[in-house]
Amino acid sequence: MTKIPCNNMGTYNGRRSKFNFTQFLAIVITVMFIITVVLTFNLLTSDHCKCQSQDVSMEQIRYIPNKLAPYASPYKLAVLVPFRDRFEELLIFAPYIHNFLNAQHINHNIFILNQVDRYRFNRASLINVGYLYTRSNYDYIAMHDVDLLPLNKNLSYAYPKRQPFHVAAPNLHPRYHYEKFVGGILLVNREHFGLVNGMSNKYWGWGLEDDEFFVRLRDANLNVTRPVNITTGTNNTFRHIHDKNHRKRDTTKCYNQREITRKRDRQTGLHDVNYTISSIKSMTIDDAPLTILNIELICDHKLTPWCDCAEKKPDNKKISITKT
Ligand SMILES: *[C@@H]1O[C@H](CO)[C@@H](O)[C@H](O)[C@H]1NC(C)=O
Ligand SMILES: *[C@@H]1O[C@H](CO)[C@@H](O)[C@H](O)[C@H]1NC(C)=O
Ligand SMILES: *[C@@H]1O[C@H](CO)[C@@H](O)[C@H](O)[C@H]1NC(C)=O
Ligand SMILES: *[C@@H]1O[C@H](CO)[C@@H](O)[C@H](O)[C@H]1NC(C)=O
Ligand SMILES: *[C@@H]1O[C@H](CO)[C@@H](O)[C@H](O)[C@H]1NC(C)=O
């Protein structure tokens, strides 16, 4: 058995090892120099970034991290998904809708409007926030439930130029069949959503905010249009991935919520939605890029005390629960 020397320098002849050592030194010096240059440059640029970001308030950050698919259409769609605590539905929804929209060559990005405060869910206010965040970069929004997947490829998500387009029409939706229904999936262009002052901020808890939005559209003389020539029906146009036993809907009504939320709200909307975006995250599910807005809504307890039904109310007997 021959011992293989560990120290090569010592075993080869002097000349060769000398040559190697000089070469080695030259390389080390070069590498050190490059590292120094790179580090200095990095420090300078990161300092620069720090100074800038300290001066910029949250409001000014119009940060759209995900690249849009480069389709020929000039219109850009922001898919706005009101969200809380539905991760397993999101895992199905995001890749599905991304592929569905790519098949239609729709330039789009998905925004998850994640409500992180401790108030009751407020779908309409989240959509207002999503609109304000995306309006300078997108031409139209899709107000989109996370649990409703379009199955029929003929359901168009094209730019709704003249009127809002209700994709989840009452004659196609698996569950809601009344004529004034505009929930589920609704496409609205930037100008129209602004024109009606967005949605009401008074709807904490589940339901009715979309019915109020219908009245806003009607008052602005905006008739909702719906898909035509669709050969599928209520049982095979959409897939509803919501498990209503696992995720109970918050249909509680407290204070005078029932009375107030049955009226058209001429008071609140886009202009007074009160919130902070506590952070913005990008993520990818399969190949679908998402932007997550972590949104803290702020409740005006005088105006809408029902943003928290449990709040310091010893006598909760009056709270009634409606099952729909
Ligand atoms: C909406 O419908 C009403 C009644 O059918 C009609 O008078 C009005 O012109 C329509 N508006 C638009 C923008 O098409
Ligand atoms: C729908 O079908 C009817 C009858 O086939 C046709 O006249 C009409 O152009 C179609 N509409 C659209 C928008 O494709
Ligand atoms: C989709 O639209 C085409 C063209 O109008 C029609 O022939 C087809 O039946 C439609 N398919 C479905 C599933 O609605
Ligand atoms: C949907 O309903 C129609 C008629 O009610 C029925 O013929 C069809 O088989 C149903 N389709 C599915 C996918 O359940
Ligand atoms: C938003 O909430 C803050 C904190 O409660 C309050 O000071 C401010 O007046 C509210 N703004 C609006 C527009 O309601």
Image: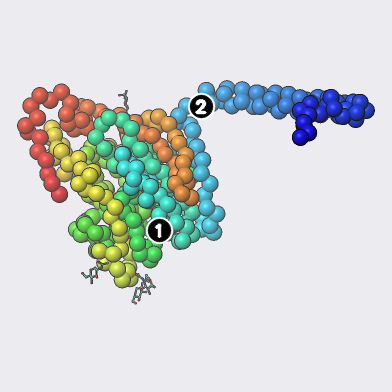
Cβ of mark 1 under 8 Å from ligand 3: the answer is: no
**Residue at left offset 17%, top offset 31%:** 309
* Above or below, 92 relative to 158: above
Q: How is the image coloured?
A: rainbow
Disc 1 residue type? Tyr
Q: Is residue 174 visible?
A: yes
Tell me which residue sits at (47%, 57%) in the image. Answer: 102
Nearer to us in this view, 248 or 30: 30
Earlier in the chain: of badge 1 and badge 2, it is: 2
Q: Is residue 13 above or below residue 211?
A: above
Image location (x, y in percent) of residue 129: 37, 38
Q: Quadrant of residue 181?
A: bottom left
Residue 224 seen from this side: no
Q: Which mark is residue 157?
A: 1
Q: Which mark is residue 56?
A: 2
Callout 2, which amino acid? Val
Which residue is at a point 25% across and 64% down the rendered structure image? 235
> Can you say whether 271 is above or below 241 in the image?
above
**Residue in the foreground of this view, choosing between 157 and 148:** 148
Q: Quadrant of the N terminus?
A: top right
x and y, in percent, of residue 121 in the image: 26, 37
